[in-house]
């Protein structure tokens, strides 16, 4: 089970969490610690399971860092990881069915095969204030 979950860490800090499409388990499994501003869970229930109706309470939260989740539906995507100093660190390749939570540092992407994916992150979106852009690792960088 855990061989299909990868914590991408640099200098003792988690930059991303990858859940590969082959992950499977019964019940509810949260992958993220409670203090993350984005929570990622996997759920597998048998037919007939009842999940109690509920409302989410209005709870004031303060979010200072955007964390995002990508779900790859089709294709392949290379994710390049960068430190806060914009220094390239490493890359991972995601395939259809993989999910990644990007939790710290910088990141860039190269589409390796035509891709269809979903992105989930906190809102409201702050436009250009939401990102600090910089040059990618370049042509000499890693390839998937």
Image (tube, helix red, strand yellow):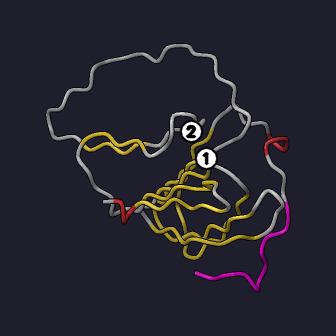
Q: Which residue corresponds to the image point at 52% horizontal and 55% vertical from the top-left? A: 17
Q: Are marks 1 and 2 in contact (CB under 8 Å)?
A: yes
Q: Which residue corresponds to the image point at 69% horizontal and 25% vertical from the top-left? A: 62
Check disc 1 and report its element: helix, strand or loop.
Answer: strand
Residue span colored magenta: 134-144
Q: Quickly name the residue at label 1.
A: 68
Please tell me which of labels 1 and 2 falls first in the chain.
2
Q: In the rendered image of this protein, does residue 138 appear above or below residue 105?
A: below
Q: Residue furthest bottom?
A: 140
Report the side of 21 relative to 123 (left or right): left
Q: Which residue corresponds to the image point at 51% horizontal and 68% vertical from the top-left? A: 94
Residue 131, how many percent across, how many down? 80, 48
Q: Quadrant of residue 8?
A: bottom right
Q: Quickly name the residue at label 2.
A: 38
Q: In the rendered image of this protein, does residue 68 appear above or below residue 47?
A: below
Q: Which mark is residue 131?
A: none
Quadrant in which the C terminus is drawn: bottom right
């Amino acid at each position: 089970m855990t061989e299909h979950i990868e914590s991408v860490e640099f200098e003792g800090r988690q930059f991303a969490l990858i859940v590969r499409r082959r992950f499977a388990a019964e019940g509810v499994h949260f992958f993220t610690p409670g203090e993350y501003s984005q929570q990622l869970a996997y759920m597998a229930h048998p037919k007939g399971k009842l999940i109690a109706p509920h409302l989410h309470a209005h709870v004031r939260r303060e979010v200072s860092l955007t964390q995002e989740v990508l779900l790859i539906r089709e294709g392949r995507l290379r994710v390049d990881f960068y430190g806060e100093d914009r220094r390239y660190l490493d890359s991972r390749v995601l395939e259809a069915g993989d999910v990644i939570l990007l939790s710290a540092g910088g990141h860039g992407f190269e589409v390796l095969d035509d891709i269809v994916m979903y992105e989930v992150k906190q809102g409201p979106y702050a436009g250009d204030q939401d990102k600090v852009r910089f040059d990618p690792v370049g042509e000499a960088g890693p390839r998937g």
